[in-house]
Structure formats: structure tokens, C-alpha cells
Image (tube, helix red, strand yellow):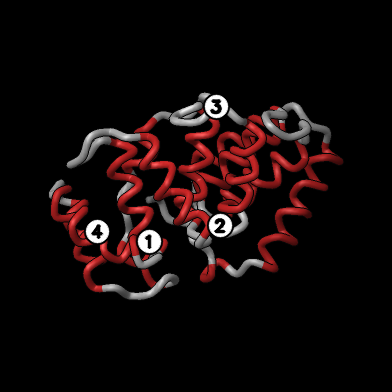
Amino acid sequence: MSKYIKLLYVFVFLLAATQAFGDAKEVKKGIEAYNVGDYASCLSMCMPDAEKGDPVAQFCVGRLYANGFGVDLDDAKALKWYGLSSDGGYAPAQFNLGVMHANGWGVPMNDVEAARLYRLAAEQGFLPAVNGLAYVNARGIGIPKDVIEGFMWYEIGAQLGDFDAVAKRDALAEKMSAEDTAAAKAKATAWMETHPKDTLHAGLE
């Protein structure tokens, strides 16, 4: 699925994101440096913790290489650092790694792997992945087509406050029966009941 562009790597990296993976002061400083365009400082501050296994720092380094910010653009290094961060369970890295597989950036295009990675991140409530998983479900990209599942994920995105998910959910509903729409809404409600909003990583990085 070549529907995402590299600007997806450039969403603001929220400081609060570090809370679930530790509270390294240097990583926070690196994130602050990134947000003001000081990429050299970002790399020097995040790299030590990335090498120690901090998933947020690894994502930070991967994003620099993915975009060529302060370093030469290098998909291989972006894949390395996103992969390590993804293995550490960090949703933004899982999603961005999925985008790289979907578009064939540094790896052969692989919609199946992209869908798998979107699901890992979507299950944590990461909005870009929620919408990405809805998209591939609704169209059968990398996974069997399932419009009920697609609607469910758009509905979850809508409940997490994403206006784009609302529009896409409503557009998809026009192609569905009332029974299928009701089933999808019930699935979304059940999912939200087992995933409290205050535990979800709904922000954009």
C-alpha cells in the first residue's frame, strides 16, 4: 500500500510519549532539540540511550535517518532503529516500520508485514495505525477484505477524537448494510471497553 508519504515520519514527537518507556532526561532533551530543528543535538542526545535499548530513543534516531534530518537519509539505518524500537513495543515505530514495508522503502514491498505492524500499533490506540489498519481491512490490502473490521477501526479512531476517521467511517457506512454497521459498532464498543482511553497512545509522533 503506497498511500503514505514520508511526512508521516515528521509528526511532532510528544514529550509525554516517554512516560511508558522510562524518563531519560537526555532523550527528552533530544526530543526538544528535534522539535526546534536542532537535529545534530537530537542525534547526540538520543543515540546513547538508543544504544542502551530505550525504544523512544531508538524511534527518535530512526526518524532522523528516515527523513535525512541532520544525517544522510538512510533507509537501512531507519529500518534498523525502527525495528529495534518496534521490538520494544513502541507504537509509533511499529507504525512507521509498517509504512516502510508498505511502500518498499529500504525493503521489498510487503503489505502483509505492513498490516501486521499496523495492528500491533493500533492495538495500543495509536491513531495513524488505527486508521491504517481500518484502511487495509476495508480494501483487503495485505489481509483478507473485511469491511466490518474496517468500520470497527474507523469507529475506534472516531471515538479517540480523529475527524478523518469520522469521515472515512461514514463513507464506508454508505456501502454497508445496517446490520453490518451495527455489528461493527458493537465490536468497536467492546474494544473500547477493554482499552481505557487514558491508557491508549492516541497521539501523533
Upstream in sequence: badge 2 or badge 4: 4
Q: Nearer the viewer, mark 3 or mark 2?
A: 3
Alpha carbon of mark 4 to alpha carbon of mark 1: how far? Answer: 9 Å
Name the residue beneath numbered marker 4: 31
Label pair 2/4, CB-CB below 8 angstroms: no
> In the displayed structure, does residue 71 sit left or right of residue 15?
left
Q: Nearer the viewer, mark 3 or mark 1?
A: 3
Upstream in sequence: badge 3 or badge 2: 3
Alpha carbon of mark 2 to alpha carbon of mark 4: how far? Answer: 22 Å
Q: Secondary structure at mark 3?
A: loop
Alpha carbon of mark 4 to alpha carbon of mark 3: how far? Answer: 30 Å
Name the residue beneath numbered marker 3: 108
Upstream in sequence: badge 3 or badge 1: 1
153 or 81: which is nearer to us? 81
Above/below status of 64 relative to 189: above
Upstream in sequence: badge 4 or badge 3: 4
Position of the N terminus by quadrant:
top right
Alpha carbon of mark 3 to alpha carbon of mark 1: how far? Answer: 26 Å
Q: Residue at x 56, y 57 (%)?
A: 125
Tell me, for residue 56, which label it has, or none: 1
Q: Amino acid at mark 4?
A: Ile
Q: Amino acid at mark 3?
A: Pro
Residue 72 location (% of width, % of height): 23, 34
Tell me, for residue 71, which label it has, or none: none
Above/below status of 167 relative to 44: above
138 or 92: which is nearer to us? 92
Q: Secondary structure at mark 4?
A: helix
Q: Secondary structure at mark 2?
A: loop
